[in-house]
Amino acid sequence: MLRRGWRPSRDVNTNSAERAQTFSRRRTAMTKYAAFDVSVNDSALCIMDADGNIVEETKVASEADAVAEALRQHRSDIGLVGLEAGPMSQHLFDGLAEAGYPVVSCETRHTKAFLKARRNKTDRNDAKGIAQMMRTGLYQEVHVKTRASQEIRTQLGARKTLQRQMLDLQNSIRGLLLYRGARCQDGCPLGW
């Protein structure tokens, strides 16, 4: 039975043998898996090979250029880059996709549940766990909106905030003037 709001990341109608065969073909084609635990200033990077051995662990600035530069020496070997979805990871996702890396944004609740099993909760260990998810295929991919869509949404949100603040200010001034006995007529945007 499927939970409400959950969508399978793979085709449900394929049997497990077909999925395993597809995954094994995909796994042999990908030799290294990179993952980032994104924070405000620094991001923890973990690069893991197909056998689960850690190739590189480091901290990089949470900027798209710095992240792409950190992955550059492994560029030909990287099969998948994983990020946990969130407000800080969207610009990194766009930057890595523009740089030509196969990048995946992972669903946050699924990632949190997977990482909860780890003993120490640190950025470094979270990056290892996300890399392990990429390596084994135990991740749920989420859609990342385009930059144009994000800009429109940001502009609409800013407009709504300004409208709400203007209405609050008008109502506050009306209340202060009412205390003094002055009344503003209906529909009067403080033009009196």
Image (spheres, rainbow, N blue to C red):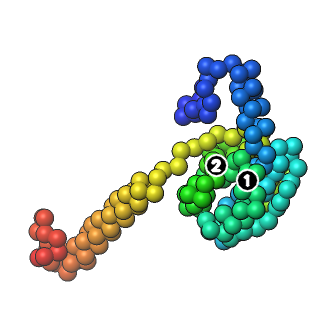
Quadrant of the image occupied by residue 21:
top right
The x and y percentages for residue 109 are 65, 45
Q: Which mark is residue 76?
A: 1
Picture layout, residue 168 above or below residue 112: below
Q: Quadrant of residue 87?
A: bottom right
- For image coordinates 63% across by 50% down, the residue present is 103
Mark 1 surroundings: few (<14), some (14-19) or many (≥20) residues within 10 A: few
- In the image, 34: left or right of 56? left
Q: Quadrant of residue 1?
A: top right
Residue 102 is tagged as 2
Which residue is outermost to the bottom? Answer: 180
Label 2: which secondary element: loop
Residue 72 screen position, x and y as percent: 71, 62
Residue at horizontal 62 percent and vertical 45 percent from the top: 107
Residue 131 visible in the snapshot: no
Residue at 60% across, 59% down:
99
Q: Is residue 78 above or below residue 176?
A: above
Where does the image place residue 61, in percent across and percent down from the top left? 68, 70
